[in-house]
Image: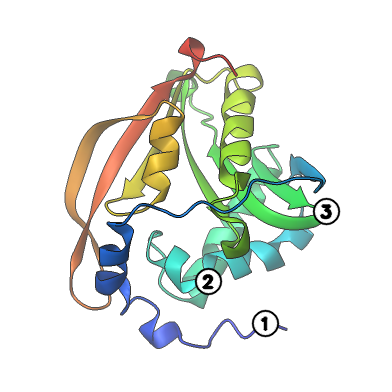
Amino acid sequence: MLNFQKGIGQELSWKRNYRLILAKKEERKPEYGKEEITIRTMVEADIFYLTKFLMDPVVLGWFPMSNLKEVQDATKVWLAYARKNASFTLEINGVPAGMAIVYVNSFEKLKDQSLFAIVVDAKHRGRGAGSKLLRFIMKQARDTFNIKLFHLEVYEGNPAYNLYYREGFREYGKHEKFLKNADGTYGTKIFMQVDLTQLEL
């Protein structure tokens, strides 16, 4: 069993230095070749992988959770949305490599818009897995859930910002000093959205 507790006390202490690295152009790994890539609805067994992905110290820096208990609470939310067919798992050769959640609304006045989140395993970042998963949930959101406005929250400095921008998302606001890090610094939350009805998916 993976030891998720290892390093929890200092999982965010690297963030200030890591942001300096992000200023450099993100290095792209080779795209996938003969690997079998499938995307399906998340199942309970995927919780193990989701926990592993979210406990990655780099990922923890870009999500509001800061320890194992908070991550476990978050995975319960993802599983609850899976029962609505709104949480998804991307598999590469049968092994989960990324997951996404679409926070579909039950309130009638809010049904044409939704927030979402994505996480990709470290060894598959920069190879197109995130793009495939994002485009899949964008299509699902529009065609299955009739969502028009698809929006997200990304913390300033997160390299995923570039992916969202490439796929048509644009900023519509910022929340300064939204996230307080373990080292006492604050992070800015950026709001982005796209009109799914204007895209060819």
In the displayed image of the protein, which residue is found farthest to the top?
198
Query: Which numbered disc covers residue 55?
Result: 2
Q: Quadrant of residue 130?
A: top right
Query: Which numbered disc covers residue 136?
Result: none
Instruction: Please state the horizontal and vertical placement of residue 18, each as a whole percent of the image.
Output: 32, 69
Q: Nearer the viewer, residue 49 or 73?
A: 49
Q: Seen in the image, is 5 located left or right of residue 159?
A: right
Upstream in the sequence, badge 3 or badge 2? 2
The crowding category of the residue bearing disc 1, from other C-alpha atoms within 10 Å (few below 14, some 14 to 19, many at least 20), is few
Front disc: 3 or 2 = 3
Picture quarter with the C terminus: top right
- In the image, residue 12 sits, relative to residue 150, either above or below, namely below
Q: Quadrant of residue 173?
A: top left
Instruction: Please state the horizontal and vertical placement of residue 57, each as a whole percent of the image.
Output: 45, 73
Q: At x 44% / y 68%, what residue is drawn? A: 58
Q: At x 70% / y 68%, what residue is drawn? A: 48
Q: Secondary structure at mark 2?
A: loop
- In the image, residue 140 sits, relative to residue 43, either above or below, namely above
Q: Specify the amino acid type for callout 2.
A: Met
Front disc: 1 or 3 = 3
Residue linked to disc 3: 93
Upstream in the sequence, badge 1 or badge 2? 1
